[in-house]
Amino acid sequence: MIVNKDEEQVCSICFFKIKKPSQKKMLDCDGNHCFHQKCIWKWIVQKNTCPMCRQNVCKYPSFGCDYNEHFHYINALSKRQHIK
């Protein structure tokens, strides 16, 4: 979810400002909730639901995603596998 505070976008997982568009990930849930890519990929590889509305979301990056999104997905996935 984006929390509007003087037009700033804030990640509702870590509560820090989303400073750049390249840091933002909008989910494919009905609410189109937005988060930092780093924060949301850690969540999605564990649960594959939106943390705000609990609707199922795609657990993989889109085919044409940018490098930054792919990097955060792979990083979150590799850390998840080390925990097992």
Image (spheres, rainbow, N blue to C red):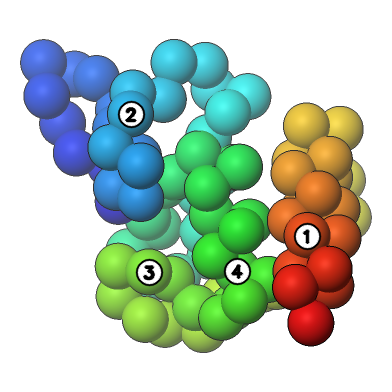
Rendered location of residue 73, percent (x, y): 77, 53
Q: Earlier in the sequence, mark 4 or mark 3?
A: 4
Residue to which mark 3 is pinned = 51
For residue 23, what is the image quadrant?
Answer: top right
Viewer-nearest residue: 63 or 70: 70
Cα–Cα gap, marks 1 and 2: 22 Å
Q: Earlier in the sequence, mark 2 or mark 3?
A: 2
Viewer-nearest residue: 77 or 66: 77
Residue to which mark 4 is pinned = 44
Rendered location of residue 65, percent (x, y): 81, 43
Residue 46: mark in rendering: none
Residue 16: mark in rendering: 2
Cα–Cα gap, marks 3 and 1: 19 Å
For residue 64, what is the image quadrant?
Answer: top right
Cα–Cα gap, marks 4 and 3: 9 Å
Q: Amino acid at mark 1?
A: Lys
> What is the secondary structure assignment of the residue under circle 2?
loop
Q: Earlier in the sequence, mark 1 or mark 4?
A: 4
Q: Earlier in the sequence, mark 3 or mark 1?
A: 3
Rendered location of residue 10, percent (x, y): 29, 32
Give the number of the mark in front: 3 or 1. 1
Q: Earlier in the sequence, mark 1 or mark 2?
A: 2
